[in-house]
Image: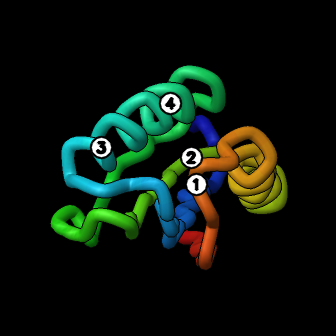
Amino acid sequence: MLQSRAMVIAACRLTLHLPGCASLKQKRGLLKPLLARLHREFNVAAAEVDLQDVWQSAELALVAVANEAPPVQSELQHIVNWIERNRPEVEVVDARFELR
C-alpha cells in the first residue's frame, strides 16, 4: 500500500492601499495584471476577495499547496516582499497567513 504524504494549504490574505486610484476602472486596471503576474510568476492562485467596490483598497487572497509547511509559507512571504519591492503603486497594509 502506498503511503500518503501530508498536504499543506497555505493562504495569505493581503490588504492593499491603492493611493493613485480614482475609479473602480482604474483599480481593476491595476489589479488585473498584478493577479495574472502573481499566478504566472509564482504559480499561486490569486484573486481579489473583498472590497471590490472601494476605489483605493483591495483584499487579495494568495493560495499555494505543498508537502511541507515551512517552504510554502516562506514562498508566500517572498511574494508579499516582491509586491512591496516591485509594485510602488500598491501599498501592503496587512498580510495574514494561514496554514491548513
Asked which secondary structure carries label 4, the reply is: helix
What is the C-alpha distance between the residues marked 3 and 4?
A: 21 Å
Q: Mark 1 Cα within 10 Å, few/some/many (few <14, many 20+)?
A: many
The answer to the question of whether label 1 and label 4 lie on touching residues, with beta carbons closer than 8 A, is no
To which residue does mark 1 refer?
A: 90
**Residue 100 visible in rendering:** yes
Q: Amino acid at mark 3?
A: Gln
To which residue does mark 3 refer?
A: 26
What is the C-alpha distance between the residues marked 2 and 1?
A: 26 Å
User: Which quadrant of the figure has residue 52?
Assistant: bottom left
| Vertical relation: 34 (above or below) 79 | above
To which residue does mark 4 refer?
A: 39
What is the C-alpha distance between the residues marked 2 and 4?
A: 13 Å
Q: Position of residue 43 (x, y in %)?
A: 57, 29
To which residue does mark 2 refer?
A: 65
What is the C-alpha distance between the residues marked 2 and 3?
A: 32 Å
Q: Nearer the viewer, residue 88 or 95?
A: 88
Q: Nearer the viewer, residue 18 or 47?
A: 18
Q: Position of residue 45 (x, y in %)?
A: 44, 41
Of the residues under marks 2 and 4, which one precedes in the sequence? 4
The residue sitting at 42% across, 59% down in the picture is 60
Q: Amino acid at mark 1?
A: Val
| Vertical relation: 38 (above or below) 82 | above
